[in-house]
Structure formats: structure tokens, C-alpha cells
Amino acid sequence: MYIKKIKLENFRNYDNLDIEFSKDFNLIYGNNAQGKTNILEAIYISALGKSFQTNKDNELIKIGKEKAKVEIDYVRKDREGTINIEISDKKIFYINGIKQKRLSDIIGKINIVLFYPDNINIIKDGPAERRKFLDIMISQLKPNYLHILNRYLKTLEQRNSYLKQIKFENKREDMLEIWDEKLADLSSQIYKYREEYIEKIKEKIEEIHNQITNCGKEEEKIKISFISSGKTQSEFLEKLKETRKIDIKRGFTSTGIHRDDFEIYINNKNVGIYGSQGQQRTAILSLKLTELNIIYDEIEEEPILLLDDFMSELDENRRTNLTKIIKKNQVFITCTDKMNLDDKKNITYHIENAKLSKD
Ligand SMILES: Nc1ncnc2c1ncn2[C@@H]1O[C@H](COP(=O)(O)OP(=O)(O)OP(=O)(O)O)[C@@H](O)[C@H]1O
Ligand SMILES: [Mg+2]
């Protein structure tokens, strides 16, 4: 699939942009603060409904303006379409001119994989970043997942507030059962999705890692392990009962799928803790390429790749390996210095103060 055209109006530092892209590589180069990342952000929002840079929609509107617009024309193997987003005090999505009711209705119209330097946080930061990685990948493929996850988070919030009421207002403890039942049910559903996708990652990541590192399996072996507090509804329920007293004391729920995590090992050592910088970067690259591969398998089409300032992170060897792997995708690459990517029908754009010009 590919994006044919992007129009922006009062989006970030853009007044008006109306531009066509190549279905192969699009290289956008220019100095800092010219608007490279902002274009990728507009594409990202069209695919996933929200930004990777902010949760505050008003930051997306050009300072001093009231409304921003994003329009994307895309082509898939079996259909074409247009996504329109209007951002003011609320965000409204249209697909082919029809207003969409739920955020989950727009997700998956185009599929993207974003590579950017902050991806390293998946390895370096706490479990929340890793859950986010999983959640974004799964929601792109299974819109219902996001729906269940949101219901879980809402129920969790209600349980937490009831825990505080037990502590401070002497509310009845046995009433917790209502929340526990609901949480345990949703947990087991979320577990199934996460487990399925962790298995898919496990199946693919070893081979991809070898392709990237160019070395035999003996030298660098990558492994993933999933950590969850339970599997079945009754297991989750049991855990909630076990931690009830502590939860009431603390005023929050200490067990559940909101604590899930996965660990990445290289040669049996946790790469987040013991990995060298190079190993961590390679592990991330392998993980992102695995995501790409999983999406491709499910939708039977190549997703669109966004590489924000990512190439400069890689050495020559890894860069070449990466470009070989992503040959069939539409790719948007941003960088500060013009680079040569052989072997591709690429278009190069120079960007200056939110104006793009073809080289
Ligand atoms: N709401 C907004 N209104 C006006 N300008 C904005 C808004 N949000 C961001 N900007 C500006 O847009 C400019 C371009 O940002 P962007 O992140 O796209 O730069 P970039 O080309 O990716 O730079 P870098 O190479 O440093 O990553 C910045 O100067 C930023 O301050
Ligand atoms: Mg940038």
C-alpha cells in the first residue's frame, strides 16, 4: 500500500502543503526544525488516530490558528481511499467523506511502522513502553483489541477509586467482587491477544536478527519472554483476591495485565540491562522489523514505513541490510543530510521552513 498525496493545513509549522509522493522511497532532508518529523506525524495520526509526539491535540494546530486539517490519499491493493482529519477542540475523522464515530473505526485504514531514535526506550525504559509497543501493533491489526483494552483501563480506574473509598469511607469490601469479575474477564481476553502476538514475535525475530547482524546463530541469539500475572479468567481472579488487602492499603490495583511485560535477551542476557549500545540498537531494529513482518503476514500487503532520523543511528552495514529488507515498501525517510540510497526509484525532497521542493 502507499500514500499518494498529503495535504496539510495549519498543521504544526505548515500553512498549506499539497504534495504527491513516490510509492517507493521518499527521502526528506533538511536542517533541524524545518518540519520533517511533522509530516511523519501527520501520516502516523492518519493511521493510528493519535500522535507519537503528544497527547495534546491542540499542539498539532499551528500556533495562532484554530483548526488544523490533514488529508491523505492512499492506495491499497484492493481499494483507494481518503482520510480526512479536522483538529480543533476535538478531532474528527472522515473516511471517504464519511464521518467516523469511533477512533477504532479509522485504525488500520493504512498500516504503518514507525522507526525513530526514541524506539530505544522500548528496551531502556520500564514495562509501560513495551506494553505500548505491543498494544499499538495489535490494535492496528485487531481494532477490537483497543476496545477491550480501553474497557479494561476504565474498569481498573473504577476499581482503584473504589479501593480508596474502602480505605477512607469504610465502604463494603465485598463490593469489589463486581470489579474483580469484570477485570478478570477482560484480562483473559487481552492475555490471549498479547500471547498470540508474542508467539508471532518469537517465531520471527531470531531469523530477522541474524539477517541484520550477518552472523550465524551461535554468535548472537535473541530471545523474547512474556511476563503476565495470569492466563485464564480464574487465575486473574485468584490473583486479585490474593492482593486485595494490599490493594486496599495502597489504594490501587497491584496485579493484572496493566503490569504485563516482555523481556529481550541476547545470548541469555537481558539486553536492557547488560546489552551494549550497539546490541540494544540492533535488538530494537530486529523487533521493529519483526513488527513489519507480522503486519505484512496478516494484511498480505506491505505496510508504509516511517523512518524518522533513524538511518543516522545505523552503521553502514546495518543500513544496507535494512534497505534490502524494506525494498518493497513505501518508505518515508527523514534526515538532515542528503544520503544516497541506491537501487531504488526514490524521490528526494529538500525541506526548508515547511516548504518541500523536489531535487
Ligand atoms: N503547533 C505548532 N505551531 C507552529 N509551529 C510548530 C508547532 N508545533 C511545532 N512547531 C514547529 O515546527 C518546527 C518543525 O518541527 P519538526 O519536529 O518537524 O522539525 P524537524 O525538521 O523534524 O527537525 P529535527 O531535524 O530537529 O528533528 C519546529 O520549529 C517546531 O517548533
Ligand atoms: Mg525531526
Image: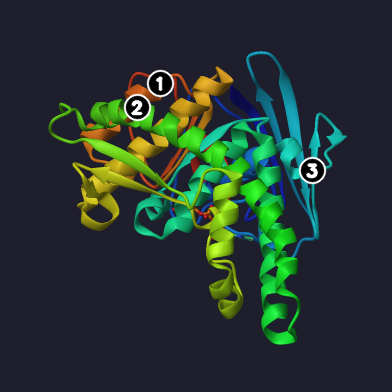
Q: What residue is pinned by disc 3?
A: 102
Q: Which is nearer the eye, 182 or 352?
A: 182
Kind of residue at disc 3: Arg
* Position of residue 202 measured from the top left corner of the image (x, y, whole percent): 37, 32
The residue that mark 1 highlights is 327
**Label 2: which residue?**
323
Closer to the N terminus: mark 2 or mark 3? 3
Q: CA distance from mark 1 to mark 3?
A: 34 Å
The span from disc 1 to disc 2 (Cα, nearest Å) is 6 Å
> For residue 293, what is the image quadrant?
top left
Q: Nearer the viewer, residue 197 or 67?
A: 197
The location of residue 265, given as percent across then percent down, is 27, 45
Q: Are marks 1 and 2 in contact (CB under 8 Å)?
A: yes
Is 282 drawn above or below residue 32 in the view shown?
A: above
In this view of the protein, can residue 355 be seen by the observer?
no
- Disc 3 crowd, CA 10 A, few/some/many (<14, 14-19, 20+): few
At label 2, counting other C-alpha atoms closer than 10 Å, the crowd grade (few under 14, some 14-19, many 20 or more) is some
Q: Amino acid at mark 1?
A: Lys
Q: Is mark 2 within 8 Å of ligand 2?
A: no
Instruction: Please state the total of marks drawn on the protein image.
Output: 3
Q: Residue at x 45, y 33 (%)?
A: 291
Q: Nearer the viewer, residue 217 or 310?
A: 217
Q: Is residue 350 left or right of residue 104?
A: left
**Residue at the (26%, 26%) spot, across then down:** 211
Q: Which type of secondary structure does the marked residue at label 1 adopt?
A: loop
- 250 relative to 205, above or below: below
Q: Quadrant of the N terminus?
A: top right
Of callouts 1 and 3, the N-terminal one: 3
- Residue drawn at x 75%, y 29% is 82
Q: Is residue 92 above or below residue 73?
A: below
Give the CA distance from mark 2 to mark 3: 36 Å
Is residue 211 left or right of 200 when viewed as pictured? left
